[in-house]
Amino acid sequence: MLLPPAAAGGRERRDVESAYAELGALGLLAPGSRDGRLTMTGSWERPRREGPLDVRVLYDDYVALRDELEAGAARELELDVRNAFVDGPVTQYNVVADLVGRERPDEYVLVQGHIDAFDGAQGACDNGTGVATTLEAARLLASLDERPRRTIRFVLYSGEEQGLYGSRGYVRDHADELERVSVVLNHDNGTNYLAGIGPTLAMLADFEHVFAPVQALDPERPFALRVSPGLTPGPSDHAPFVEAGVPAFHWDQSQEGYRRLHHTQHDTLAEVDDADQRHSARVIALAAWRFAELDHLVDRTRLRRPEPRRMGVYLAREDSRVVENVVPGGLAEGAGWRVGDVIVAIDGMEVQDSKQIAAELQKGGPQKRVVLERGAERVESVLDYTDDPQEAERRAWEEEPAEAR
């Protein structure tokens, strides 16, 4: 049976799946995104369940099949699906290598990426590129005749895509070392060259020193320091370190072309830019060495900024006000949002794109009135952050005097 595009995610999808299962459906055919992507996702744990098989096809193929069926044609599909459940736990491994420091071997600079990938393609840009720059930076630094002052540790994590399990495990198992980790440099955003990094004001002087040669490395690939009011975890392997109070960074990179590749059938080796990769590896090697050579650890004053408010949806690329998917268990699902809803206004302020949506969401009190367009009607809903554990931290952060930030 065909799963309607409007039921592509959230509570409505589960209701449709249950109804089809009761009708005896053996499988559900769902469309990919309108721009031709088949997006892979999934968690590490799935309960065994009976019910219809779930298959996604290209959006245009789905529409063509739907139109033929609605016109009364009979169609037969042949699918080769080889799914299997495996009783866990399934052991996974991180890969760790040290370039041991000559003076302070028990202090660390971490260079890292994640070694796992979804299998819709080759995982070349997510995160073969981060693995490659980590390994190349290690090769470059190991080839020197001199050892760094501190230990530079190179780490490739497993289980990132299922919930940062490799990096969370590392932080858990190395808790006694975290106070001696100066900085963490995480590459997990594709092949575009590393274009910047965002230190806090307390860190800025050290970062200006560390990245001085990087900024002069290649005029065609400029590098900028972006002062950040505070670090936030984000969805990659730097997050567990930030949560533990360690200076950890996700490099700034151009997002051009990345959404097309991220977790999709397009993420192949052909998309990797060799020149950008070589440049990024040099940036990482220089930065790691110079952080390891500092007289002191990176300053942790006012390190972590509270997590921003999130709605619990994915927004469409074509019009970033359109809800493309509703995250199960998120605030938007609880407020009754649906796939295809269009975000029109937040607290009376009309919004034009995702940046305005994010900005308006962070303002004011914890209850946000959101107006949605749903077909021909307008729907009002409330996203209530009152019980969010981060809300008190957000308020304290914003109320602190500007000179203390």
Image (spheres, grey):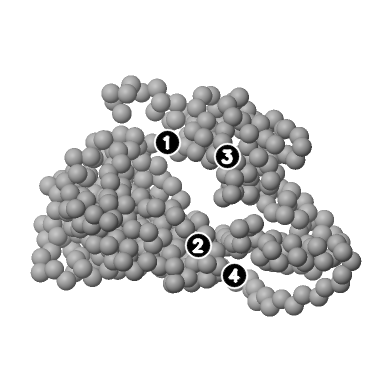
Task: State the SS at label 2.
Answer: helix
- Residue tagged 1: 306
Q: CA distance from mark 3 to mark 4?
A: 34 Å
Task: State the SS at label 1.
Answer: loop
- Residue tagged 3: 311
Q: Nearer the viewer, residue 178 or 123?
A: 123
The amino acid marked with disc number 1 is Pro
**Marks 1 and 3: which is nearer the front?**
3
Q: Which disc number belongs to residue 87?
A: 4
Q: Give the mark nearer the N terminus: 2 vs 1.
A: 2
Residue found at x 81% / y 75%: 76
Quadrant housing residue 108: bottom left
The amino acid marked with disc number 3 is Met
The amino acid marked with disc number 2 is Leu
Q: Give the mark nearer the N terminus: 3 vs 4.
A: 4
Residue found at x 14% / y 49%: 294
Task: State the SS at label 3.
Answer: loop
**Marks 1 and 4: which is nearer the front?**
1
Q: CA distance from mark 1 to mark 3?
A: 16 Å
- Residue tagged 2: 261
Q: Give the mark nearer the N terminus: 4 vs 2.
A: 4
Are the two marked residues, 2 and 3, in contact with CB atoms closer than 8 angstroms? no
